[in-house]
Image (cartoon, helix red, strand yellow):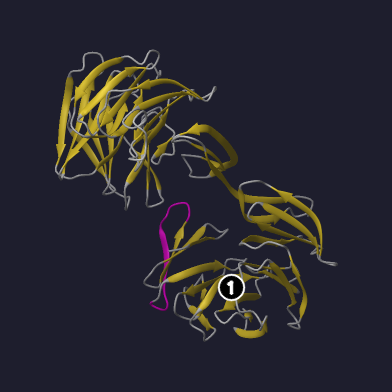
Amino acid sequence: YLNEIQENGLYAVGYKNGKIRLKDATTGQLQKTFQGAKERVSQLVFSPDGTRLVANYANAPICLWDVTTGQSLKTLTQNAKMWGVLTFSQDGKTLACQKHSGEIELWDVATKTLRTTLGEDLRIPIHTLAFSPDAKTVVAANPNGEIRIWNTNTGAEVSVFSTGHTRKFGALAFSPDSTLLASGHINTIVLWDTRTFTQLSNRVDKNAWINAVVFSPDGSTLNSVKNFSFKKRTRGPFIKEGVLSTLSLWDTCTGDKLSDLPVESYLGELPKLSGVQNSSSSSSGANGVVVFSQSGNMLATALNSKKATKDYRFTVHLWNIPHRTVNLTLKGHTDNVNALAFTPEGQTIASGSDDGTIRLWETSTGTEILKLQSGKTRTLAFSRDGKILASVSSSIKIYKIQLWDVTTGDKLTSIEEQNDSGNVLAFSADSKILACGSRDGTIRLWDVATGNKLSTLKGHANWIHALSFSRDGKILASGSSDGAIFLWNVPN
């Protein structure tokens, strides 16, 4: 499916069976359902005023919908194969789409008639397309590095010029007065003079992928949206990694987004691992596991790859993050290490393995403190006070939650479930409730003192990958591979 969010708080979701559902972005409640062609919906775009929704199907003509009534207004084009570029002009009066044969069609939205056809010599898909603010000009970028510009009234091509780029364009945007054109490509943003079509400036942001560019209303500022990541191989089982993403802050009471903040991180030389979780507990990945201490000053990694050297396989490394160095190497496990967890104060780390043991280590000396016989461990979590360790171990169609006294190593509670689904654990702030997220999308709440099940929370459609209680213990946040974050009222 593909989502398109509209300013009035609705978002549209298209499905493989051709259904389109409009939902409230705040509550998630279904508002309307459209059923057009019974083909996969490949693209959805709202008109600027939000009154129209256009849908592109895999093997059916483009369809225009009235958002208010839910009625299909018109099937545009008779060609069942359209390439995935749909763009409204800023006044919402014109819709541009590219036929599979290459031409770009401009449709009058009010009359649902074809205004003109552009680029009849085009034989390749356009990567991105933009209208000038006055809708008199349309510009398109193709994979050959060309930018082509047409007059929308006459259909005549105004200019074509090469940018030198040979890979996919990410974005195009006009300034409000139409005198500037910004193009985003891989890691480069270029400003063009639309009167002479000469390059005015070129800005390179290494290792960033430009996804969108937009001018401020007065045209004085250009903002870009980008993904930033890099991986550089070094000697040994290491890889240098970095990422620049966006951190979104949300109001947990209203669901409103408060702010977007850029977050840049550089991990230095770390094993190439999957299953990364920036928290004090972890889950296993295909090649290993990695987890930060709550202070962020320590990082623990375990490498399970068969290509790893003997010194790294089944071994836990403790990293000093400020200095980017390995402080300690913890050896003892004889099979894959699937889970790691720091105590809240960071003085102890637990490691769980397929060798059937959980081992507790002092982070200051690397001394093994306890060795617990647990079965093949999938995930671990410490209580907020650091006195209890929870583990999930699994066998065929059965998973077992076990609670351990960290001081003595005694088993406090053992809970067996008749399905192979325990995936992630989290303790409440008072350490009285343990939440277990499952692969079937359910979350089970357990009484830590008695081992009794308190509740089963249902709502997610897929694996639960993350759980976190609020500090007052009243709210539980859950994240799933279905793309949703749920907030649960714990008392009820």
Considering every residue shown, the one lying at the far right of the view is 196
Badge 1 density bin: few <14, some 14–19, many ≥20, Cα 10 Å: many
**Is residue 209 magenta-colored?**
no
**Image check: 182 left or right of 197?**
left
Q: Nearer the viewer, residue 337 or 479?
A: 337
| Above or below: residue 20 compared with residue 61 | above
**Image check: 27 left or right of 115?**
left
Measuring from the top left, give residue 433's x and y in whole percent: 27, 29
What span is colored magenta in the figure? Answer: 25-38
Q: Count how many numbered circles sit on residues in the image.
A: 1
Quadrant where the N terminus is found in the figure = bottom left
Residue 191 seen in the figure: yes
Q: Nearer the viewer, residue 263 or 447?
A: 263
**Image check: 104 left or right of 4?**
right
| Above or below: residue 257 compared with residue 277 | below
Quadrant assignment, res 28: bottom left
Quadrant assignment, res 195: bottom right
The residue at the point 50 percent across, 68 percent down is: 43
Q: Callout 1, which amino acid?
A: Pro
**Image check: 67 left or right of 315?**
right
Measuring from the top left, give residue 78's x and y in whole percent: 52, 86
Measuring from the top left, give residue 314's x and y in whole percent: 31, 31
Residue 343 seen in the figure: no
Quadrant where the C terminus is found in the figure = top left
The residue at the point 58 percent across, 70 percent down is: 85
Q: Nearer the viewer, residue 61 or 272?
A: 272
Measuring from the top left, give residue 135's x and y in whole percent: 73, 72
Q: Secondary structure at mark 1?
A: loop
Name the residue that disc number 1 marks. Answer: 125
